[in-house]
Image (cartoon, coloured by chain):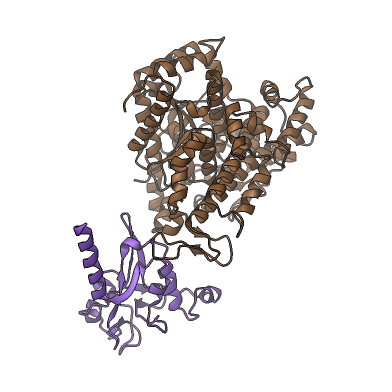
Amino acid sequence: MKSKDPAVNRLIDVALDRGVETVWDRLAAQQPQCGFGELGVCCRNCAQGPCRISPFGDGPQRGVCGADAHTIVARNLVRAIAAGCAAHSGHAKHLAHALHKGLDGKAAAYGVKDETKLRALAARLGLDTEKTTADLTRKLLDTALAQFAEGEEPMAWATAVMTEGRVRKLAELGVLPTGIENTVADMMHRTHLGVDADPVNLLLGGIACSVADMAGSHMATDLADIMFGTPAPVFSEANLGVMKENMVNIALHGHNPVVSDVLVQVARDMEDQAREIGAQGINLLGVCCTGNEVLMRHGIPSITHSISQEMPLLTGALDAMVVDYQCVYPSLAGVAQCSGTPLITTMDMAKIPGATHVGVREEEAREKAREIVTMALEAYQRRLGRPVNIPRHKSKVVAGFSVEAVVRALAAVDAEDPLKPLIDNIISGNIQGVVLMAGCNNAKVPQDQNFLTIARELAARDVLLLATGCGAGAYARHGMLTPEAVGEFAGPGLKAVLTAVGEAAGLGGPLPLILHLGSCVDNSRAVDLAVAVANRLGVDVDKLPVAASAPEFKTEKAVAIGTYAMALGMPVHLGVVPPVLGSAQVTSLLTAGVKDLLGGYFIVETDPVESARLIFEALQERRQGLELPTRAW
Amino acid sequence: MKNEILIRYQRCLGCRSCELACAAAHSKAGSITGAVLAGEKPAHRIFVTQSGDRKVPLNCRHCEDAPCIDACITGAMHREQSGAVANEGGPGRCTGCWMCVMVCPYGVIRSDLIQRRAVKCDRACLDESGTPACVRSCPTGALVFAPVEEISDDRRKEFLIASID
């Protein structure tokens, strides 16, 4: 089985019929994949290599330079964290530059939309908020851009969002980063031939880099909220059935709302032009985290996620796929060619051979967005009369749970102390703990299978679930971001809490079974929630019955996120084995040793039911530590 | 033929170094980089295949009673003096009828559709020490060039040690 999503499976059959290659074909063609790479013991960092360490006693045990398996595995892992950090932080910096140009009057598409968030964030960062909006924004942007350079002190965007205890602990270990880009550069330096060979020291460097990643991700969330609005609960739909044959279907794919949010605004103004050519209007659709960004803020339906990103093109009804960056498969160009759909790249640093490039500079974002919509209108006219194959499957979705929205909902129960209802229910055991389901799909796992199984097992045992990124996408496509799913899957305690809060907040029923916090940079929202609860209880996050799971992860960004969740003190489950098993020392540090240092640690388990059990046990261990009532699996 | 290419499949990590080395040894240039630079597309004659959790390299077993030789109507498929079964340098010329491909129980004869000829392991890749390219390239010792008796001796000893413990 390739996917648990029936709409995806239907289009896989279409691909097969038409001889279109998909991600699953390419995975099959890659079999067997190299075991050295799987174990993390291949080093390509110098021209004396590539070197491989034999996992068996009688092969080479050291690379040409003398690096052993532990050094090589650790170096490869921290390089992945550095890449993830560079990606999330690059996304944040892009937003900062766009807002900067907006303030300077050079980019009309960008400005401050949510002043409340601006002021709250400025206060949190310790800035003087007695300023005009423009001045305060400028001050905030100076602070934001300063985070990228090497500072004198640990970076404010990291320390301001953690518990004080965690700041002290990370400082003691020497892993509080002083800036984002110097930390990434430091990892590249340390993993160069003949620099850092100590696996423990390398991992500590990786942890510092992951903290920089958390700060960068947080900044990306913060700036997007300020520029485009902080999400509030929104009703929409998800899965391929959201395409409409008689509308101009435009998919927005990638990660950064910097282009997609402008496209949403511009497309609204161009509805008439769509009707003039005989279409019933413009139907915007989200893919991956760009999809999450526009779902959270504008209720744009999500069409599909991650490994199934080629599928919308196979319907024959897509009129443009507009991409920014990250997780955008180059294979889209080939599929787009088969379907005659324009694949439009928008970032000058992320082009794809075979795609049409419309570089969207911030200064002319609206003009370029109009140009892109016009290309889609032309494609619509070309496809008229051709058969389309749109699966019927779609699910209702309730999304938009920023921390602000969650606190607002909780405040409807207790306006004085909004976190109290949540904490009281965790203490009583109505909620056994809180688990963040995050990360990607991975073609090695039947799509969504681990997400669905783990959520069902945990929800039935009264665990409150949060979701981000393509994990949230999986739940959206399978109808699990709905109040209806509460009746179907939630245990009695969880059901009572979700119903009480939902009704108090005026939703006329329970909150959805799983709260959609947003894109993968929005894992920062989960950090904020955990830190708020920890601060309210006067403990650190490593004492709370909370955990994170990336049951189908694939990207370097996910490695960085998992590491910062661990660094903050969370048990982090991985449902795909990361390439570290070639070093028993690194493996044991990540799954056990680090627990004594940071409280967080990794749980690696590929079976989804067993994964759920291990996550549940981790929550129970924390409950026991807080002397709260515990439950058996 | 004293030595055989034997497989200790538990050790195979699926890196496909043997496939690359085999193809390079059968290229005109004789090396991976030489073949790549010359734009050659040599075919490998050993196949690393995923089977459940296992990764297994498999090539011609050079059968004593070789069905491919029996099935060959042109006389291209023949046994060399060394005992190796080869499809080139024999009494006839391969016409690409694929009879050998069809009768090979291991599926280790491949078809070169452009030159229309069957391609298989021919041991035309031995170095000065008489070791095949695939065995030389294997970084984990999953491929061994040794007398069969040596493998069965080792296997017996492993079994007995494990049973007695």
Q: Quadrant of the C terminus of chain A?
A: top left
Location of residue A199 in the rendering, given as x and y in whole percent from the top left corner: 53, 50
Does residue A568 appear to the left or right of A580 in the view shown? right
Q: Nearer the viewer, residue A346 or A250?
A: A346
* Res A273 → quadrant: top right
Q: Nearer the viewer, residue B92 or A593?
A: A593
Q: Which chain is purple?
A: B
Residue drawn where x is 62% and y is 53% of the image: A190
* Res B83 → quadrant: bottom left
Does residue A61 appear to the left or right of A194 in the view shown? left
Q: Which chain is brown?
A: A
Q: Nearer the viewer, residue A446 or A597?
A: A597
Residue drawn where x is 44% and y is 70% of the image: B20
* Res B142 → quadrant: bottom left
Q: Quadrant of the N terminus of chain A?
A: top left
Residue drawn where x is 38% and y is 38% of the image: A450
Q: Seen from this angle, which residue lies furthest front?
A: B165
From where the camera sits, is residue B87 visible?
yes
Does residue A248 appear to the left or right of A621 in the view shown? right
Does residue B72 appear to the left or right of A597 in the view shown? left
Location of residue A315 in the rendering, given as x and y in whole percent from the top left corner: 46, 43
From where the camera sits, is residue A270 visible?
no
Location of residue B156 in the rendering, given as x and y in whole percent from the top left corner: 21, 67
Residue drawn where x is 74% and y is 25% of the image: A127
Location of residue A53 in the rendering, given as x and y in whole percent from the top left corner: 46, 61
Residue A225 in the image: above or below residue A606: above
